[in-house]
Amino acid sequence: MASLSQLIAKPGTFSPRSPRTSSGLRPRRATVQRVWCASSRRERSEAADAPKHDRRDVLLGLGALGASATLMTARRAGADPIATPDISTCGPADLPPGANVLTCCPPPSNALPVDFAPPGAASSPLRTRPAAHSVTADYVAKFNAGIAAMKALPADDPRSFAAQASVHCAYCDGSYSPEGFPGVELQVHNSWLFFPFHRCYLYFFERILGSLIGDPSFAIPFWNWDAPDGMRMPAMYIDRSSQLFDPRRDGRHAPPKLIDLDYSGREPRFTDNQQIDHNLRVMYRQMVSLSPTPSLFFGSAYRAGDEPNQGPGPVENIPHGPVHIWCGDPNQPGREDMGNFYSSGNDPLFYAHHANIDRMWSVWKGLDARRHTDLTDPDWLGASFLFYDETPKLVRIRVRDVLDTGALRYRYQDVPLPWRAARPTVTAAATRRADSLLTPAAQAAGAKKAGKLPITLEEAASVAVKRPVAARRSKADKASREEVLVIDGIEVDRDVAAKFDVFVNAEDHAAVGSGGRELAGSFVNVPHRHGHGHGKKGRGIKTTLRLALNEQLEDLKAEGDESVEVTLVPRQGKGKVKVGSVRIELMH
């Protein structure tokens, strides 16, 4: 039988593209025949939990038989989740001139992947991830030793720092296709895969690091940027003699500079106290106001055969995106390292940033045990990824494997959540009255009445949006259904750093105070590139932004309005973002 090393391509190779139709579009599912026959969601869920043979294993078993016609029908029975990538098709991302990575492909494997088994409590100590600003000198020394050991390994060792950095690049910059869908790019951002993928990534990174220093109890730190004491770049990362230092960062943002969790490429003119207050209100908005239900918190569904970038959740947009851009070096062509997905894993600070993002998943579930639950969709639970562990073995891990951090044998240091009491406030002078039209004051502030959509955001644009209900809703109705502002058909080139803010009933958006309630939310694009023939350089993404409105409409006293005024304000990448439509829906 052909070996896996023969079947897995070396970095730099890429898969054949699927044929195009007469319209120039690839058929989404032409390469796969379904064998699913269950008729109910319950049956789908049960089938998704049942043992199955992964297509990668079927592929390897049939490789010597030349049964290529059978391979396309060998898709496993069950639900339709994003499956482990076809790592044999890993190819180079479309990187900018002067890019500081050679490949986005982790080292190939010469063995079959094994299914993930959670570590046992008896053999694996419970690791506590500490807040980066609170660690001891001994901890910093041990962390430095671990990163130094990873960096000392050759790049073709999957445990090396270089190989670990390439994992993020491969999954985030189009170097993989989902199994069964050659020519369709796999992307773990801008959808419900964002949280579980990065949890898996950090888990294996942490296990590798602990193994190299001989301490299985070692836990990576989290950057506690959601609390005042942690709102500066942690000290351990700015020592130029440290293994944790990365020269490709924005030098203006070294301590004592406070982070701006709503950063849009321009330096805010806040005092420290104002910046802290602003950050706390941003955190409340993203974690509470905009995240009332699992479907909104995790982001849009992303299933096998779908084009990527279905729509991010609130936390992925902000603070995740702005922190990336705030850290990246503006003197680099793509704001590398942290400011671009392909290079982010080269900065040790990346792992502390994403540890706090991962912590937000756990924190969110603790805010409201009744409503804040994990998704139950079998297509989410069954989605899978491939990683190397500390031995190193190639491991297939599924979303259902990582829902409980305790089962993964780690937890987070218990720290305060000051943003829970930072509900945004109304800026009275900037809020449109329910019976008014767009006034000269709004015109003077730069909000032009939008014509027919779609529009390109060259400047602030305002549009009246009809609500699906035009009366005050009962408390029970609001608890069961969320009014959601849907901004659809958002198009932007992938390698453009872009951000636009969305205001509701703000007659003068420029007058909205720090963390003002009129700001409904924002869209953020962190630059990234294409991979192995998925499109020409500069090809754009098309995605959707969903913003929960119940709490905001209540605070703005707009629950009885027939429509609301929505203002879109470009902050970064002006003239490079298109919006297709704006509407309001009711979602359970």
Image (cartoon, rainbow, N blue to C red):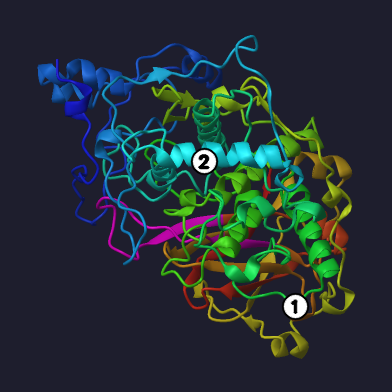
Q: Position of residue 488 (x, y in %)?
A: 54, 59
Q: Write the residue at 67% across / 82% down.
A: 447
For label 1, the residue is 269
> Marks 1 and 2, Cα distance to the nearest angstrom?
36 Å
Q: Write the residue at 70% across / 45% down.
A: 132
For label 2, the SS is helix
Q: Is residue 234 visible?
A: no
Q: Residues within 10 Å of mark 2 (few under 14, many from 20)?
A: many
Q: Is residue 17 visible?
A: yes
Q: Write the residue at 63% across / 81% down.
A: 449
Query: In the image, what residue type sits under mark 2?
Result: Ile
State which quadrant residue 401 falls in.
top right
**Quadrant in which the N terminus is drawn:** top left
Task: Using the image, determine if residue 7 lies above or below residue 76.
Answer: below
Left or right: 339, with 233 as reference point: left
Query: In the image, what residue type sits under mark 1?
Result: Arg
For label 2, the residue is 147
Left or right: 585, with 15 as reference point: right
**What is the magenta range?**
521-544
Task: Using the image, determine if residue 486 lies above or below residue 83.
Answer: below
Is 529 contained in the magenta span? yes
Q: Position of residue 482 (x, y in %)?
A: 73, 47
Task: Using the image, determine if residue 99 lies above or below residue 195.
Answer: below
Are the residues at dot 1 and dot 2 in contact (C-beta closer than 8 Å)?
A: no
Is 191 contained in the magenta span? no
State which quadrant residue 130 falls in.
top right
